[in-house]
Each structure stands twice: as C-alpha cells, then as structure tokens.
C-alpha cells in the first residue's frame, strides 16, 4: 500500500525498501533516455527504484545515464542502478533487470517514453485496493501534431483485447514480480511483438486484473521503431512470434484438457492480418502462406473460416479493423 517513507524498513540500498520498481532497457538512446529518467524521478510515489539495463549501446548512452545517476545520487528515497547485458535484444536486457528486482511489483518501461507523474502512486493505490496481480492503464500515443491519442481498454475479454490491441504493451501495465517470473519472464526468441507474447502467457495464467481508466504514460513513436510501417522489413520475425504464441496455446490446452477456441480464433485472425499486410506490401507468397496456416486450424467453424477469408481480402486492399467482421 502507499505509505510514507518512514514506514519502510532499511535495506541494502541504503534507504527504504521499494514496493515498485521500474526496469528500462536501453540501446543507443543517448538523446532520449534523460526524458524517461526525468519522468521516473518526477513520480510522486516513494520510495522508488529504477533499473536501467544497457544492451550494448555504441553511442554515449552509458555516459548520459551515469551522469544522471550521479546528479540524483543524494536522494534517499530514490535510487537508479545501471547494469549491462551483452546478449542482444530487449528481452535479454529486461530479464537482466528482472533478476535484480526485489519489489512486489515491476513495471517494464521503454527508454524513449514518459511516465505521467502520478503513474506509480495511482498504480500502487489500485493494487492496494484491488489486490490484483496486474494493473492496466491507458497510454497516450503522441502524434506529430503534439496531441496524445488514448489507447483502448475495457472490462471485456482481456485476452481478446490483447490479441487485437496489445493491451499489455510495456508502457501500459505493472505486474507482480513473482507472476512475471512464474510465467518465464521475457522470451528472447520473440524478436518482435515480444511484449504481446509475454502478455499472452500472463493472461493465460489466469491472473486477477484491475483497470485504471486514465492515461498514465505517454508513448513517443520513433522513426526507427522495430514495428515501423513495413512488415516485410522484419519478415519471418512476425511469423516466428505467432508460431511461439500457437505453441503457448497448445501447451495451455494440454494442461487444461480443453480446446481454447477463442484463443485459436484470435491467433488465426492475427495470422490473417499479418498475411494480408505481406500480400499488400508485395509478397503474395508469404501472405498466402500465413493465410493458409490460419485456416488450417481444423477446430475453427465454417462461419469463422468464411469471416477470416473476408478479413484477409478486406485488409489486403487497405481495410482497417477487420476483426469486426469476426463478431468476436
């Protein structure tokens, strides 16, 4: 629960034991990382710990973080620790940070975004009241005009929303540290959509969830963002993450002894959507391959197979929000 600094016991960090830790992986963000760190320091919740994990930066990111760390070193209720992870990939860096977390809750953040000042306090208040394993909030996606477009979140099926909207993207939730560890942490084999992949594992573990219906983080899209605007730029990587998700669903079905129809249908939609974009961008063969794989699931009904075909062609020719055709 939220309490004054004096109510926390002393620990190895030299001040109070934090209940909330922010983990930030960073790679060549010397020009942006200070904005994220400043937003962390501006949090009204204390005590607070921030873990930055550098992932082989070749610019002066380490110098920038070290200088920032030295400037804020004398704050007894705030601590920043800098670690290094040589294994390439944000997942490896996040797992390195996860190893060092001692708090009840962990928040994985990105090095180019901003936290609203009341993010940690609001999230921890909600956790104290709801006792939930995961607290989800809205994020604001900054447009070129300088306006933040709010993300979507409702109390309907969390799995459905995550498959379609990625409601468990890194900026939008905190989770019990023990839960993240129990599901295996971050999967370094998922080179793209890795927060989406982790979100599936978290949701299939049947956690308790609570929603904060307000914007608590601001996302600043970057030109070199790995998701970008072209799927062909990372062809094969998207397919691989979908294959990993399929295996996750199969393992969950094996443990429960039941077919997870909704999850299978949502995965099929995700494949169809990816295939349509491949086709639209000029690789018809790769697009049709994903389309055939999606419809190859024998558990899907004729109605949904027909709807998936419509989704494919609708998206291929520029349509948006094709999932509405499925009547999920």
Image (cartoon, rainbow, N blue to C red):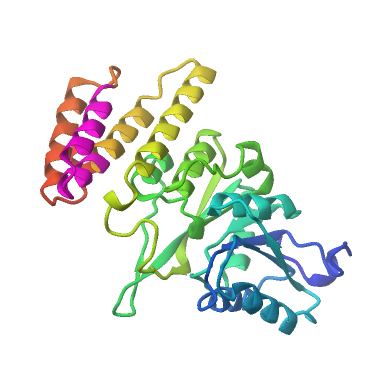
Which contiguous range is marked in magenta? Answer: 274-296
> Which one is nearer the viewer's eye here, 12 or 324?
12
Relative to 165, 258 lies left or right = right
> Which one is nearer the viewer's eye here, 70 or 324?
70
Residue 138 x %, y %: 44, 61
Residue 196 x %, y %: 44, 46
Residue 198 x %, y %: 51, 43
Relative to 323, 10 lies left or right = right
Residue 271 x %, y %: 29, 36
Give the quadrant of residue 76. bottom right
- Quarter of the C terminus within the rendering: top left
Relative to 120, 271 lies left or right = left
- 168 to 311, vertically: above or below: below
Asked if the magenta segment contains residue 289, the reply would be: yes
Relative to 74, 50 lies left or right = left
Furthest residue in direction front, as rendered:
58
* Residue located 64% across and 55% down the image: 86
* Residue located 51% across and 40% down the image: 189
- 296 to 164, vertically: above or below: above
Magenta stretch: dominant secondary structure: helix
- Quarter of the N terminus within the rendering: bottom right
> Which one is nearer the viewer's eye here, 323 or 270?
270
Give the quadrant of residue 206. top right
* Residue located 40% across and 45% down the image: 162
Residue 231 appears in the rendering = no
* Residue located 35% across and 41% down the image: 236
């Amino acid at each position: 629960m939220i309490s004054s600094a004096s109510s926390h016991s002393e620990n190895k960090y030299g001040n109070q034991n934090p209940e909330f830790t922010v983990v930030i992986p960073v790679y060549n963000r010397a020009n942006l990382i200070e904005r994220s760190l400043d937003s962390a320091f501006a949090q009204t919740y204390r005590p607070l710990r921030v873990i930055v994990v550098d992932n082989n930066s070749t610019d002066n990111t380490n110098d920038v973080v070290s200088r920032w760390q030295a400037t804020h070193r004398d704050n007894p209720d705030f601590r920043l620790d800098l670690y290094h992870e040589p294994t390439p990939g944000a997942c490896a860096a996040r797992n390195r940070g996860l190893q060092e977390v001692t708090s009840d809750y962990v928040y994985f953040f990105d090095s180019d975004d901003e936290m609203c000042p009341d993010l940690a306090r609001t999230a921890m208040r909600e956790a104290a009241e709801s006792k939930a394993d995961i607290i989800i909030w809205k994020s604001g996606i900054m447009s070129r005009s300088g306006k933040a477009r709010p993300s979507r979140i409702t109390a309907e099926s969390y799995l459905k929303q995550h498959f379609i909207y990625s409601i468990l993207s890194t900026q939008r939730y905190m989770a019990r540290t023990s839960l993240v560890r129990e599901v295996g942490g971050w999967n370094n084999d998922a080179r793209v959509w890795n927060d989406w992949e982790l979100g599936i594992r978290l949701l299939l573990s049947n956690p308790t969830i609570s929603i904060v219906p307000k914007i608590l983080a601001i996302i600043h899209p970057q030109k070199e963002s790995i998701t970008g605007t072209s799927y062909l730029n990372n062809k094969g990587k998207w397919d691989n993450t979908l294959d990993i998700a399929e295996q996750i669903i199969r393992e969950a079905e094996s443990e429960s002894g039941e077919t997870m129809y909704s999850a299978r249908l949502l995965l099929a939609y995700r494949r169809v959507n990816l295939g349509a974009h491949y086709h639209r961008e000029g690789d018809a063969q790769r697009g049709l391959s994903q389309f055939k794989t999606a419809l190859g699931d024998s558990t899907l009904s004729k109605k949904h197979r027909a709807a998936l075909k419509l989704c494919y062609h609708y998206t291929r020719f520029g349509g948006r929000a094709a999932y509405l055709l499925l009547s999920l």
